[in-house]
Amino acid sequence: MIASDGLAGSAGTTAVICLEKVGKVYQMGAVAVRALEDITWTVRSGDFWAVMGASGSGKSTLLNLLGLLDRPTEGRYRLDGTDVAHLDDDAMSEQRLLRLGFIFQSFNLIPQLTVQENIELPLFYRGVEPADCARRARDLAEKVGLAARLRHRPSELSGGQRQRVAIARALANEPAVLLADEPTGNLDSHTGVQIMDLLSAMNREGRTIIMVTHEPDIAAYASYRLHLRDGRIETMEGPAP
């Protein structure tokens, strides 16, 4: 069990995410709904965290804050040393593009684009030259085992292959952190194991991963586990720092 100060992580490595007493309150008419409260948590480079909790525990809200899709109402969030409270919307979008990779349960691929074009998309938004985009996409497709599927569209792929495309796309800009939202939720158990083996291999190479899941067997792939209950951290588990 890790102490509740949230300072768990790989010893001697740099903090890429630091939350200090973060809270989130939504105003629903005249009613204030507190989704998160007093979240203090540090994620260090190379960590693999699983975020768990019952429905309504605050997992989605926490992931939205980490992914810069929403802002805390209270507290401080630093991403790779940058205090996000001081960023305007354009700067938040730039931070998302450069520092974060997203892997979704529903894959979120663009159906009209090929595998290569889907992987290239973050690079295109970053303004990378087309030849470099293509080379990076080919390298990533090979890394996730899809080198022979570059010209296929998502409808021509299995669920596991689509998730591999999503992982490759998430890696395109070399993000500081991969955020995975139920990455095996739409996959059968065998394919889910393959995807988790792939994520585990990337973590062993030094990739920082934060994964939301409700499945204990999937959470077991992570080195650290954070349990939310009613918007607060209930426990943190993992090896001693």
Image (spheres, rainbow, N blue to C red):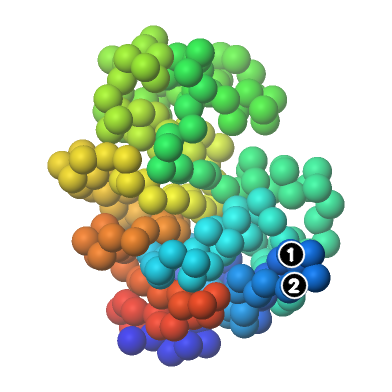
Looking at the rendered structure, the kind of residue marked 1 is: Met
Query: Looking at the image, which residue sits at the far front?
Result: 30
Picture quarter containing residue 82? bottom right
Q: CA distance from mark 1 to mark 2?
A: 5 Å
Picture quarter containing residue 237? bottom left
Q: Tell me the element at label 1.
A: strand
Number of the label disc, if any, that sits on residue 161 = none
Relative vertical location of residue 53 with respect to residue 110 in this rendering, above or below: below
Relative vertical location of residue 4 with respect to residue 74 in this rendering, above or below: below
**Residue 56 visible in the picture:** yes
Location of mark 2 (residue)? 31
Relative image position of residue 175 (x, y in whole percent) = 54, 46
Residue 81 as seen in the image, left or right of residue 211 = right
Q: How many other residues sit within 10 Å of disc 2, few (<14), some (14-19) or many (≥20)?
A: few
Relative image position of residue 197 (x, y in whole percent) = 23, 47
Residue 155 as seen in the image, left or right of residue 95 = left
Query: Looking at the image, which residue sits at the far top?
Result: 151
Relative image position of residue 76 (x, y in whole percent) = 71, 73
Looking at the rendered structure, the kind of residue marked 2 is: Val
Q: Nearer the viewer, residue 224 or 159?
A: 159
User: Is the N terminus in the top left, top right, bottom left or bottom right quadrant?
Assistant: bottom left
Relative image position of residue 44 (x, y in whole percent) = 49, 68
Q: Nearer the viewer, residue 201 or 61?
A: 61
Location of mark 1 (residue)? 28
Relative vertical location of residue 59 with respect to residue 235 in this rendering, above or below: above
**Residue 47 visible in the picture:** no
Query: Looking at the image, which residue sits at the far left?
Result: 190
Q: How many other residues sit within 10 Å of disc 1, few (<14), some (14-19) or many (≥20)?
A: few
Mark 1 vs 2: CB contact within 8 A: yes
What's the residue at 31%, 46% (across, down)?
184
